[in-house]
């Protein structure tokens, strides 16, 4: 049984989770006016330690999302990291967890705008396993297009933007697939419903550039660093055509929730041989060690929660 979560940081203090409530009139609930992060913490049983992965990078992205959305966050990135560690200590989790900071327009008024409204901030954490079940999955190209940056900021994690993600994900699951690949408005590959995408062609990793309406994924960057430094595999950022998905040697999704998730079939065509490819398999293994603080070269990416 996963441990229940007991606390939230809410309105400037740690409170029992039952007290972290908002009104139905809250602007964020009515109009999707929030920005958030999804962060993972990994339990390392040998070291009896919980490691938060890329904590500061997530908090810095939260600050950038706030800037885009005219939101005030009265905490520095360091303070946000400290609050996260404090929350996890209070929870006392001894298993993998997922941390959700959320900044939101908290006014209880009929007002569709960003300026001149109050911002509230909360963090809670839950124990968490796999986000996408299975060790290798089947994907489809969605009939939904990815939100375009002039319609809604695609590089910010805006609550309302996840309507797009939810439409694509539900379509994929109801049609019998495990995940969606969403094309951008220009018809090129953008990303998954809540993860970035890499393909392998001719020995190189290829991912859409940050101008392809993708979220600027932290795992996406981690994968690029690991592939270059540890596997000696070149990483190319360029637009990807839909049919390149069908002829790729390998493909995988990557994200905090998704982790590194091999794709073995796209639109009913096997990816490569239809088995998990060697570059993907090595990245899965490497990532598994890095996030749990087992790779000394990347230990600085992991923030320990418990003293000692
Ligand atoms: N794209 C979207 C739309 C996402 O929600 C996520 C998950 N945060 C990602 C990509 C992957 O980003 P990250 O690696 O920073 O979790």
Image (tube, rainbow, N blue to C red):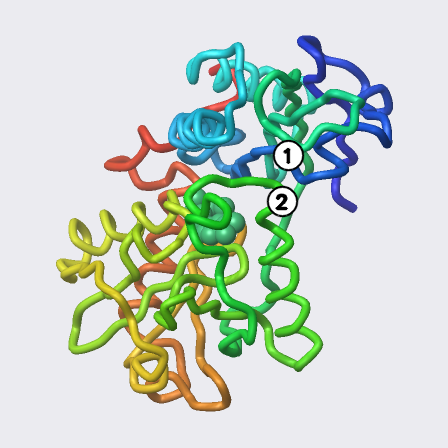
Badge 2 crowding class, 10 Å Cα cut-off, few under 14, some 14 to 19, many 20 or more, is some
Left or right for 252, reference 169 = left
Identify which residue is drawn at 34% across, 32% down.
301
Q: Percent from the top left, x then y, of residue 235?
A: 18, 59
Tell me the residue that label 1 is attached to: 33
State the image coordinates of residue 297 (x, y, percent, origin top left). 24, 36
Residue ID at (71%, 17%): 10
In the picture shown, does residue 19 fall above or below 231? above
Indicate whether 114 appears above or below 308.
below
Asked if 93 appears above or below 241 in the picture, the reply is above
Identify the residue at image location x=44%, y=90%. 269
Q: Is residue 180 left or right of residue 293?
A: right
In front of the other: 78 or 64:
64
Estimate the x, y position of residue 191 in percent, counting from the top left. Answer: 43, 62
Closer to us: 296 or 244: 244
Residue labelled with disc 2: 160
* N-term-proximal mark, 2 vs 1: 1
Q: Quadrant of residue 205?
A: bottom left
- Is label 2 in contact with label 1 (beta carbons under 8 Å)? yes
């Amino acid at each position: 049984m996963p441990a229940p979560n007991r606390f939230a940081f809410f309105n400037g203090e740690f409170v029992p989770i039952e007290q972290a409530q908002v009104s139905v009139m809250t602007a964020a609930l009515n109009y999707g006016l929030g920005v958030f992060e999804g962060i993972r913490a990994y339990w390392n049983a040998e070291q009896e330690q919980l490691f938060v992965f890329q904590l500061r990078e997530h908090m810095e992205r939260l600050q950038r999302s706030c800037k885009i959305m005219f939101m005030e966050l009265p905490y520095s990135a360091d303070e946000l990291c400290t609050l996260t560690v404090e929350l996890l200590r209070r929870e006392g989790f001894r298993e993998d967890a997922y941390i959700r900071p959320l900044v939101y327009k908290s006014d209880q008024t009929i007002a569709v705008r960003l300026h001149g409204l109050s911002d509230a901030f909360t963090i809670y954490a839950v124990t968490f396993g796999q986000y996408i079940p299975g060790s290798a999955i089947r994907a489809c190209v969605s009939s939904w297009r990815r939100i375009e940056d002039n319609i809604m900021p695609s590089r910010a994690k805006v609550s309302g933007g996840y309507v797009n993600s939810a439409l694509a994900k539900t379509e994929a699951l109801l049609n019998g697939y495990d995940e969606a690949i969403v094309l951008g408005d220009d018809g090129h590959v953008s990303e998954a419903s809540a993860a970035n995408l890499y393909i392998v062609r001719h020995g190189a990793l290829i991912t859409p550039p940050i101008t392809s309406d993708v979220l600027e994924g932290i795992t996406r960057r981690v994968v690029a660093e690991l592939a270059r430094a540890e596997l000696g595999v070149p990483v190319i950022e360029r637009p990807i055509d839909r049919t390149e998905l069908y002829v790729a040697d390998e493909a995988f999704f990557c994200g905090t929730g998704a982790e590194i998730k091999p794709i073995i079939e796209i639109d009913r065509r096997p990816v490569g041989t239809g088995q998990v490819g060697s570059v993907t398999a090595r990245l899965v293994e490497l990532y598994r060690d890095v996030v749990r603080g087992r790779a000394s070269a990347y230990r600085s990416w992991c923030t320990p929660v418990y003293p000692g």
